[in-house]
Amino acid sequence: MEDTEKEIPNTSGELLGSVRMARFVARGSLRLDAVVPAGMNAEALRVLADGVPPVPYGTPLDQAFPQGSFVARLLGLPRVAGALRSLVGPGPTVDHHAVHIREPRGGEAQPLHADAIIDVRPDAFDVQLMYYPQEVTLEMGGTLSVPGSHLRRVNESDTGRYQNLAGQDRLVCPAGTVVFLHHGLWHGGRRNDSDIVRYMFKVRFNPTVRQRLLWDATDLDDPRVRTELDAHFPWYEQAAGRLERYNRVLLWRELTGDSAFDLDHWVTRVTNRPRKAAA
Ligand SMILES: O=C(O)CCC(=O)C(=O)O
């Protein structure tokens, strides 16, 4: 594909550092509180109520939303653009987008799910941006998500029978918050028990470049990178989330190109296939 980087409306923005990338790899999400200015949040309530025209699957980002439109400006905000570029690189395509409206005192909580079908890509991932133009209170039923669940691959709502999991996160956030989710993260909209309509705008992005060292990796050797990658989440079974830590190592190796990286020898042990003949 032609290098369209210079035409992309969002610039490289403010790139993430390695510690935040490692946190994303461990948690499966990145939260940017109140990154969208108040004026744009007020505008968003009108724009989202009117609906955002659909775009065909796989539309290059620079062609998906008209220049100067609300969504183009949202995605061009330096911290939003920088996070997106750090995660999926320059020139992503828009998989799809949707305005999610949860009516006041209406509807039901969504079952816990991962979007789309099981997607086990070990060396690439999509991200979903979720934008909340209003302050979201607990009553408004913010999006539920389960930190660290994204690498436990499930088919859509296989997880729907789980009502509550230890350590789950019910989003409560200030207006203008943007959250990026790894495509595999288990999540679901909660019931809105307030009198206020709750809006959320979601866009899924597919990378078009290899997801390797796309962030500001000058702090790659910071010891907090390893601490983040080793994070434990309360829903893991007794074995302390070995499978999750194992899968994080695989992903971190892909993202950095460091094929020797490991935590507690897990991947080194499992990938050990000596070829040397015995003397
Ligand atoms: O409404 C929400 O908070 C989340 C909805 C959602 O992510 C979904 O429908 O997949």
Image (tube, helix red, strand yellow):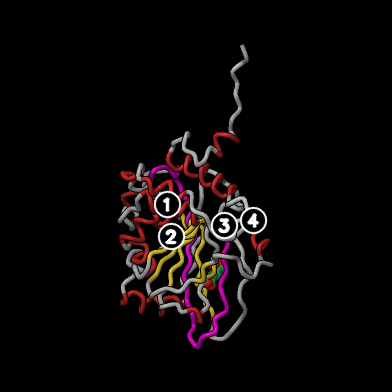
Badge 4 amino acid:
Val
Q: Which residue is found at the position 46% from the left and 66% from the top?
A: 130
- Distance between the alpha carbons at the discs numbered 3 and 4: 9 Å
Which secondary structure lies at badge 3?
loop
Q: Are marks 1 and 2 in contact (CB under 8 Å)?
A: yes
- Mark 4 sits near ligand 1, with its Cβ under 8 Å away: no
Q: Which mark is residue 154?
A: 4
Badge 3 amino acid:
Ser
- Mark 2 sits near ligand 1, with its Cβ under 8 Å away: no
Judging depth in this view, the residue of 110 and 53 nearest the camera is 110
Magenta residues span 185-214
- Distance between the alpha carbons at the discs numbered 2 and 3: 14 Å
Q: Are marks 1 and 4 in contact (CB under 8 Å)?
A: no
Q: Which mark is residue 30?
A: 2
Q: Earlier in the sequence, mark 1 or mark 2?
A: 2
What is the quadrant of residue 70 in the picture? bottom left
- Read off the residue under disc 1: 87
Residue 261 lies, with reference to residue 75, above or below; the image says: above
Which secondary structure lies at badge 4?
loop
Q: Earlier in the sequence, mark 4 or mark 2?
A: 2
- Distance between the alpha carbons at the discs numbered 1 and 4: 22 Å
Q: Quadrant of the C terminus?
A: top right
Q: Position of residue 207 (x, y in %)?
A: 46, 49
Which secondary structure lies at badge 1?
helix
Q: Position of residue 188 (x, y in %)?
A: 57, 69
Instruction: Check the image and name the residue furthest to the bottom.
Output: 195
Q: Residues within 10 Å of mark 4 (few under 14, many from 20)?
A: many
- Read off the residue under disc 3: 149
Judging depth in this view, the residue of 27 and 106 nearest the camera is 27
Per the picture, the main secondary structure of the magenta-coloured stretch is loop
Which secondary structure lies at badge 2?
strand
